[in-house]
Image: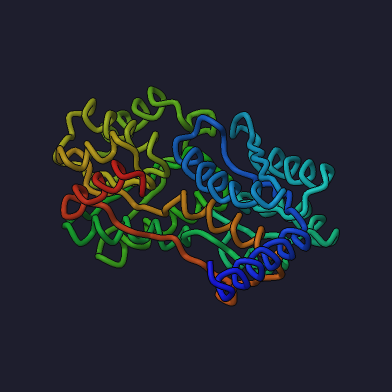
Amino acid sequence: MTFSQALKTTVSAAVLATIASTALAADIFVIGGKPDDPFWSRVKKGAEDAGAVAAAQGGSVTWLGPQNYDNLGPDAAELIRQAIDQGADAIVGPDWVPEAMDPAFQAAVDAGIPLVIYNAGGIEAADRLGAMNYVGAVDYKSGFAGGEYLAAAGHKTGACVNTLPGAANIEAFCNGFNDGLAAGGGTGSVLQLPATAFGDATAVAQAVRAHLLQNPDIDAMFAIGDGDTNAAVSGIQQAGKTGAVHVCGMNFNDSILANIQGGTQACAIDQQGYQQGFFAVSILNNFVNYGVTIPTREILTGPGVIDASNVELVIEGVKAGAR
C-alpha cells in the first residue's frame, strides 16, 4: 500500500467514525394497516427495508397497526399516542380519518416529533399538521384514473364498492372514480357496505351480485383494494355479467394480475405501497440523524394504470422482487 492509499484509508476510517459517533440513532414508529392486509404487508416491507439502514446506525423501526378496521379513526389515533408515549424520535402515519386522528398527530408535532404523512391525506394533511412531507398517491386522482380508463373504454354507468365508509381516502377513491366516469360522459354511484365487509370476500361478492341484478344498467365497477377487487370479479361472475361489467381496482396481487391476463379485470391502479413505506422511513431516518430534508414535500408514488398492455412487464417486476 502506498503512502497516499494509507492516508486515504485512515481519513475514510476517521470520517466513518465521526459519522457513527454523531448519528442520533432514530427510533421511528410507523402507523399502518392490519398485519394480514396484502397491500399493507408491502408497505410494511418497504418500511422495514429502509429500517435496515436505521438499525445499522443503531436505530429501529416499529410497526403499529390495528387488529381490524371496525373503529379505524379512533384506533389509529390511539396508535399515534402509543408511539408518542414510547418515545418515538419520528412518526410516519396515514391520515385516514382526519377528525379522529388529527389531534393525535398534532400532539406529536407539538412534542417536537418529526412527522411524515403517507398513503392518505395528501399534501393538504401534511400542510395542516405541520408534517415534513407527504409520500403516496393522491387518492382522488387514483380513483379518477380508474373512472377515466373505464369511460374511455366505452363504459357509461359505474359503481364504486366502498367497504370502509367514513375513511377519507376511501371516500376520495370513490369520488374520483365517479368524476372520472363523468369526465368521459358516464355516471357513477357508490355501493356502500359496512366496514365488517372489508376483506370478507363472500360478503362483498354477494353484495356485488345483488347490486348488479338490481341495477342491470351498471357496466363498470371500482373496488378500493385487491381483496375487494377479487371479490367484485367473483360477484360479477355470479351475476352472469362477466364480459358485460368491467372492473378496475386499487392495488394488485398475483390473482389480480392473473385476472388482467385472463380478461376478467380491466385494470388495476398502482400506488406502489412498497415505495411509500421505504421513502417515508428513509426521509425521517436521514432527518433525525443528519438534518437532511427533501425540498419536494409532495412525493407521489402513483397512480399508475396496469392493464393488458403492460401486465406482463409488471409480472416480471414481481418475479424480480421490484414490484
Residue 124, x across and y down, in percent: 61, 68
Give the quarter of the image for residue 280. bottom right
Q: Is residue 5 left or right of residue 82?
A: left
Say which of 260 and 5 sits in front: 5
Residue 250 visible here: yes
Q: Is residue 70 left or right of residue 219?
A: right
Say which of 28 and 25 sits in front: 25
Q: Is residue 281 left or right of residue 309?
A: right
Above or below, comparing residue 177 to residue 124 in the picture: above
Residue 93, x across and y down, in percent: 64, 51
Say which of 240 and 81 sits in front: 81
Give the quarter of the image for residue 102. bottom right
Which residue is rendered at x = 71% and y = 48% of the image? 59
Residue 244, x across and y down, in percent: 15, 41
| Residue at the top extreme of this rendering | 202
Above or below, comparing residue 306 to residue 201 in the picture: below
Residue 31, x across and y down, in percent: 65, 45
